Image (cartoon, rainbow, N blue to C red):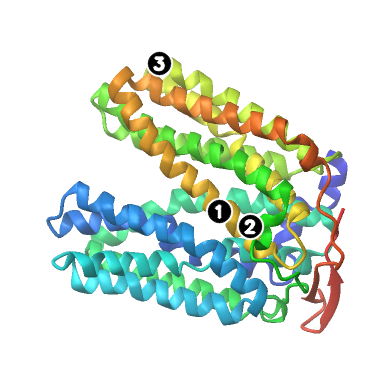
């Protein structure tokens, strides 16, 4: 299998495909405002003389609005196409943050309205990219490798994004950083939606149903599991802050988060470097179990050097689990709902992370830092148990009466060619 992966060129094979590098880079840049939004809002509020409580309230409103908007916009993309939804959404989202940057926090209702506007219209670029991969790459093995590359690229964004924000704040101000980051976000979205694959992409005809993608039992099972994966990750961020405070070294928090990202990066690169046999649903159960088991040693809370090593270990199976989850979403999404289905995964993961942060705080205050990390381990184990309990519905992807028809762009140029989504 390693020989086969080498023959296909690994990740370079993906990036050399026409339009692939542009789509990946444009999506990452387009998602910058959302990826570093909470940090940017916190820095801006503090620079304006606001409290951490106000910053937390604005971030919560932004996160809730994003959770509501993602699946709705994803459904709109499936119905109307990427260009007609993604670009207007990106502009409206950016205008929300521009409004906040220009008006400040003196008028609180206006500040909250600005972040709600920004969150509600955050474009579902993440789900849109995954919907594009089959038409851009063709072969199923290349699409699966692209999902792994996508997960790896996310870790790079979450590492580079805060560094870029810090640089912009140092050069100018938090308000200027908000403006620059959101302008970059619109340019990233523009790069994606003006590409030939995005302009040509059309979702398959869909059955009219108010539940949309959520009528798939397999997708619901996956979302239930990844809610708890998100909970685990959210609790780690809070517990890591408490660990750094215990050691009297705030910088340790940054090292732990970087180590977790490094572990995910290494794991994602290794996972995507080879093809995998067997059903992805069975593989996902193993990956989530390994993810949970790697969270448990964090409860030992050893010295900073050893703890950093454990943080690397805790991240190793995150990107592979996400990459495998993308494949499962693709298999179980009802016809014509693929962007919406991917957007639901983003939303569920984010809501779980928010709840994990909320649960870990009281756990640390009541029983100490190790308990905060124990919440992460428990969340991972519950995620595994959900997959185990729903094995029957996950074994059989929902039947699709109509193939996921799309207009793809051929490798040789811009001539549209008709393709069908592999229903496995």
| Res 181 visible | no
Q: Position of residue 101 (x, y in %)?
A: 24, 69
Question: Is 289 above or below relative to 6?
Answer: above
Horizontal side of residue 246 vs 338, given as left or right: left
Q: Earlier in the sequence, mark 1 or mark 3?
A: 3
Q: CA distance from mark 3 to mark 2?
A: 38 Å
Question: Is 361 above or below relative to 201?
Answer: above
Q: Residue furthest bottom?
A: 415
Horizontal side of residue 106 vs 75, given as left or right: left
Q: Which residue is mark 1?
A: 346
Q: Position of residue 375 (x, y in %)?
A: 45, 26
Q: Position of residue 325 (x, y in %)?
A: 68, 46
Whether pointer 1 and pointer 2 mark residues with C-beta atoms closer than 8 Å, the reply is yes
Q: Position of residue 86 (x, y in %)?
A: 55, 75
Q: In terms of depth relative to the viewer, which is nearer, 247 or 99?
A: 99
Q: Which residue is mark 2?
A: 342
Q: Give residue 19's quadrant in the image.
A: bottom right
Q: Give residue 202's quadrant in the image.
A: bottom right
Question: Is 367 above or below relative to 128?
Answer: above
- What residue do we see at 28% from left, 24% from top? 365
Question: Is 240 above or below relative to 335?
Answer: above
- What residue do we see at 73% from left, 73% from top? 203
Q: Secondary structure at mark 1?
A: helix
Q: Secondary structure at mark 2?
A: helix
Q: CA distance from mark 1 to mark 2?
A: 7 Å
Q: Nearer the viewer, mark 3 or mark 2?
A: 2
Q: In terms of depth relative to the viewer, which is nearer, 254 or 70?
A: 70
Packing grade of label 1 (10 A; few <14, some 14-19, many >=20) is: many
Q: Secondary structure at mark 3?
A: loop
Q: Which residue is mark 3?
A: 302
Whether pointer 3 and pointer 2 mark residues with C-beta atoms closer than 8 Å, the reply is no
């Amino acid at each position: 299998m390693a020989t086969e992966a080498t023959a296909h060129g690994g990740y370079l094979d993906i990036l050399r495909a026409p339009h692939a590098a542009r789509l990946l880079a444009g999506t990452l840049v387009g998602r910058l405002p959302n990826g570093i939004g909470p940090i940017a809002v916190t820095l801006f509020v503090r620079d304006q003389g606001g409290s951490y409580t106000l910053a937390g309230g604005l971030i919560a409103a932004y996160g809730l609005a994003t959770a509501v908007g993602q699946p709705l916009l994803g459904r709109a993309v499936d119905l109307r196409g990427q260009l007609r939804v993604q670009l207007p959404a990106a502009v409206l989202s950016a205008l929300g943050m521009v409004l906040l940057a220009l008006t400040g926090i003196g008028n609180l209702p206006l500040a909250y309205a600005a972040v709600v506007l920004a969150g509600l219209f955050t474009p579902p670029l993440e789900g849109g990219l995954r919907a594009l991969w089959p038409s851009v790459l063709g072969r199923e093995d290349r699409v699966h490798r692209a999902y792994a590359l996508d997960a790896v690229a996310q870790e790079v964004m979450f590492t580079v994004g805060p560094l870029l924000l810090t640089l912009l704040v140092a050069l100018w101000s938090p308000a200027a950083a908000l403006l620059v980051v959101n302008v970059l976000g619109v340019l990233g979205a523009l790069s994606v939606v003006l590409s030939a694959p995005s302009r040509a992409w059309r979702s398959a005809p869909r059955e009219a149903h108010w539940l949309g993608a959520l009528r798939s039992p397999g997708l619901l099972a996956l979302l239930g599991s990844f809610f708890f994966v998100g909970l685990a990750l959210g609790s780690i961020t809070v517990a890591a802050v408490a660990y750094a405070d215990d050691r009297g070294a705030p910088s340790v928090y940054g090292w732990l988060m970087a180590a977790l990202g490094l572990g995910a990066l290494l794991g994602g690169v290794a996972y995507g470097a080879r093809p995998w046999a067997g059903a992805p649903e069975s593989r996902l159960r193993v990956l989530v179990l390994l993810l949970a088991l790697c969270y448990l040693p964090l409860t030992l809370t050893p010295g900073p050097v050893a703890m950093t090593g454990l943080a690397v270990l805790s991240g190793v199976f995150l990107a592979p689990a996400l990459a495998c989850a993308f494949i499962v979403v693709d298999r179980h999404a009802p016809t014509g709902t693929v962007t919406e289905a991917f957007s639901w995964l983003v939303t569920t993961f984010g809501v779980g992370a928010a709840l994990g942060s909320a649960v870990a705080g009281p756990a640390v205050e009541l029983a100490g830092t190790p308990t905060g990390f124990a919440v992460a381990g428990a969340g991972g184990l519950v995620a595994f148990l959900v997959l185990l309990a729903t094995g029957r519905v996950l074994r059989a992807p929902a039947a699709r009466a109509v193939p996921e028809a799309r207009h793809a762009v051929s490798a040789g140029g811009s001539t549209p060619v008709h393709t069908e989504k592999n229903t496995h």
